[in-house]
Every structure is written in C-alpha cells, then in structure tokens.
Image: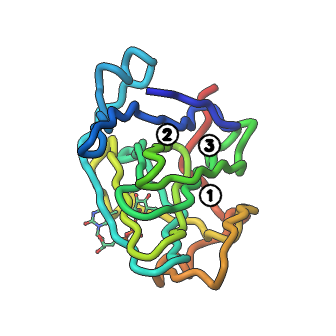
C-alpha cells in the first residue's frame, strides 16, 4: 500500500499493492487494520457504486452536514475519472482550496476525502464506474451541494458537463455557509 499526501492535509492518495499473475491481478482494495496502522482508522458503514454513461458526466460538489458528515474512500472500478476534494472547514488555512487526482480501473488509485470536504468527479471515459466507502449512512436531510464551477477547479472538460438538476442549481462557494469548522 502506497500512501501519498496531497496539498490538502488529510486528503490522501492510496495505491494498494497489486499481485499480478497469469490470470490478472489481486489487490486488497481496503484493509481496515492496515490503514489503521498508518493512522487512518475510519468506521465505514456504506459502500456506494454509480455508473456514468457519458464522458464529461460531472457529479458534485457534494457533502453531508453534521451529524451525518461522511469521509469517503473513492476508487474507480471501470473506466477513468478525475476526482476532486475541496476544503470547506471554516477557519481552515486551506478553506476553498482543492486537489484533484486521476483515478482509473487501470491505475487502482484511491482518494481519501475526509469529512469537511466537498467531493466531486468528472468522467473521462464512457461507462465509468465509481466505488466509494462512506463513514456515515446516507441522510438526505443533511445532503448538500456547492456549484461545481465556483471553486476555481480546472476540470479539463472537453465539452459541457452532464449534470443533475440539483448540481446545475447548486449554490456558489462564495454564497455558501459551511456547516464545518476547522478544529486545527
Ligand atoms: C448519495 C445517495 C443517493 N441515493 C439516491 C438519491 C437519489 O434518488 C439517487 C441519486 O442521488 P444523487 O443524485 O445525489 O447521486 P450522485 O450525484 O451520484 O451523488 C453522489 O455524488 C458523489 C460526488 C458523492 O460524493 C456522493 O456522496 C453522492 O453525493 O440515489 C441513495 O439512495 N443513497 C445515497 O447514499
């Protein structure tokens, strides 16, 4: 397991070891004990899986507010996507800053998005599937979104993105009152 820090404290890129042989490969995509040994001890309770048919499908930027805030461990099961996290902890020295990573079925990379961050992604290939573990259950009353194009993210789109109506009408970051506070 390779663990890389990013420019945002707490946002990590994880690359599980792959054991290749004549059949293909084997990888432990999540091992709680191994991550805990590296200081990442999250109590994941829900696994999510979505398929996006078209290139430039953009989902985000999403969060769940406390008391149902979610950390997410994100990977790509098919195709390729660009995954993004944005710090929305009020008072954080990196409030509003973002990081992105290319995740693909081929590279096996994962992004750990802590609670207190927006999460979103755009697909780079047709029929891309994303898989992610969440540290709290879906709570629609705590579900929120910030407009994808209000955080200065370089999405590197090749055409206008395909969005849900909810995401198309999301509040811009400048008008957003975050429910998260930086705890130092
Ligand atoms: C997120 C979620 C949605 N749903 C339902 C609600 C709705 O009918 C349908 C589609 O929901 P959405 O449009 O919110 O799906 P989507 O836009 O894919 O939302 C996801 O986007 C990425 C970026 C995230 O980080 C996730 O946490 C989640 O917010 O699925 C669940 O049943 N459970 C869940 O955990």
C-beta proximity under 8 Å, tags 3 and 2: no
Report x, y in % for residue 18: 37, 35
Q: Nearer the viewer, mark 3 or mark 1?
A: 3
Position in image of residue 118 (x %, y %): 55, 54
The Cα atoms of the two marked residues, 3 and 2, are separated by 11 Å
Closest to the camera, between mark 3 and mark 2, is: 2
Looking at this view, name the residue that lies furthest to the top: 37
Which quadrant of the figure contains the C terminus? top right
Which of the two discs, 3 and 2, labels the residue nearer the N terminus?
A: 3
Q: Which mark is residue 177?
A: 1
User: Mark on residue 89?
Assistant: 3
Where, by quadrant of the figure, is residue 108 drawn? top left
Residue 20 x %, y %: 33, 36
The answer for how far apart the CA atoms under marks 3 and 1 are is 10 Å
Of marks 2 and 1, which one's residue comes earlier in the chain? Answer: 2
| Mark 2 vs mark 1: in front | 2
Q: Residue at x 24, y 45 (%)?
A: 23
Q: Which residue is mark 2?
A: 114
Q: Position of residue 36 (x, y in %)?
A: 37, 19
With 36 as the anchor, is 163 left or right in this view? right
Q: Quadrant of residue 131?
A: bottom left
């Amino acid at each position: 397991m390779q663990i890389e820090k990013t420019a945002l404290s707490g946002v990590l890129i994880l690359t599980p070891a792959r054991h290749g042989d004549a059949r293909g490969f084997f990888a432990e995509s999540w091992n709680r004990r191994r991550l805990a040994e590296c200081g990442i001890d999250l109590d994941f309770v829900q696994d999510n899986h979505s398929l996006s048919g078209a290139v430039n499908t953009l989902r985000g930027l999403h969060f769940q507010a406390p008391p149902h805030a979610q950390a997410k461990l994100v990977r790509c099961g098919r195709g390729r996507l660009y995954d993004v996290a944005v710090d929305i902890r009020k008072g954080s020295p990196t409030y509003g800053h973002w990081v992105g990573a290319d995740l693909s079925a081929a590279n096996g990379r994962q992004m750990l998005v802590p609670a207190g961050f927006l999460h979103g992604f755009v697909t780079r290939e047709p029929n891309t599937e994303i898989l992610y573990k969440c540290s709290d259950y879906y709570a629609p009353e705590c579900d929120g979104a910030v407009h994808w194009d209000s955080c200065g993210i370089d999405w590197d789109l090749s055409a206008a993105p395909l969005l849900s109506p909810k995401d198309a009408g999301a509040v811009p970051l400048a008008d957003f009152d975050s429910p998260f506070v930086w705890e130092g």
